[in-house]
Structure formats: C-alpha cells, structure tokens
C-alpha cells in the first residue's frame, strides 16, 4: 500500500504533470490536444504521460493514429485541490 501511495505522490511531484491532470480533468485528450495548453514538446508531454500512466493515475486508449488519455479516478483531483486549499490557507 505504501509503495502505491509513494508512486502516486512521486508522479504528482512535477508542475507539468499537474497541468496535464488539470487539462484532463476537463475531459480526455490526445497529446496534440494537451499540448495546446502546455507549451512543451510532444515527446516531453508523452514522457510525463507515461509516468502518470505507470502510476495508474491516467489510462490510455489508442484510437486510429492517436492515443487518448483520461484520468482513471477523479479522486486524484481531490489531492490536487487539497494542496491548493493548504496553499491558500498558508498564504494568508
């Protein structure tokens, strides 16, 4: 159990991956769609998506030439929201 938790928090420990998850929270998308809001190379985004996938935070489905990603559980967004709430409280 602890190893699973550590892997999730490690996967969340990068600003680009947080941005990716916020984008995917709006709905599934392929790398080209995610790249519209996150200004990094598609190769770089793909690497970050692989980390999120390996941590079982997102899942992927190939459709034609594209791979679409979506968040496996909305609970991961609860973790992100909790950190935002802590930040807001501590920033006062």
Image (cartoon, rainbow, N blue to C red):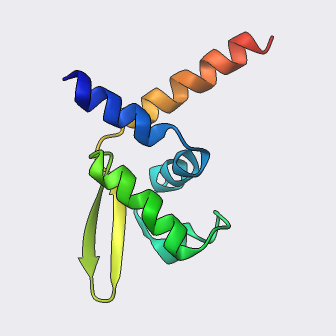
Q: How many marks?
A: 0
> Residue furthest toward the bottom?
65
Q: Does 58 appear above or below 63? A: above
Residue drawn at the location 38% of the way across and 53% of the way down? 51
> Residue furthest toward the right?
92
- Residue 54 percent location from the top left of the image: 28, 51
Residue drawn at the location 27% of the way across and 81% of the way down? 63
Q: Does 63 appear above or below 55? A: below
- Residue 37 percent location from the top left of the image: 64, 64
Q: Does 67 appear above or below 49? A: below
Relative side of 28 to 90, left or right: left
Relative side of 56 to 45, left or right: left
Between residues 17 and 34, which one lies in front from this camera angle? 17
Relative side of 78 to 39, left or right: left
Examine the image and state in which quarter residue 40 appears: bottom right
Residue drawn at the location 30% of the way across and 41% of the way down? 73
- Residue 36 percent location from the top left of the image: 63, 71
Examine the image and state in which quarter residue 46 appears: bottom left
> Residue furthest toward the left?
1
Rendered-image quadrant of the C terminus: top right
Q: Does 15 appear above or below 47? A: above
Between residues 49 and 28, which one lies in front from this camera angle? 49
- Residue 70 percent location from the top left of the image: 35, 57
Rendered-image quadrant of the N terminus: top left
């Amino acid at each position: 159990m602890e190893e699973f938790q550590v892997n999730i928090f490690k996967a969340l420990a990068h600003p680009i991956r947080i941005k990716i998850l916020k984008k995917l929270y709006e709905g599934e998308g392929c790398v080209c769609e995610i790249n519209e809001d996150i200004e990094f190379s598609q190769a770089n985004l793909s690497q970050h998506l692989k980390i999120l996938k390996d941590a079982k935070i997102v899942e992927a489905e190939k459709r034609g030439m594209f791979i679409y990603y979506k968040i496996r559980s909305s609970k991961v967004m609860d973790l992100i929201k909790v950190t935002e709430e802590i930040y807001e409280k501590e920033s006062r």
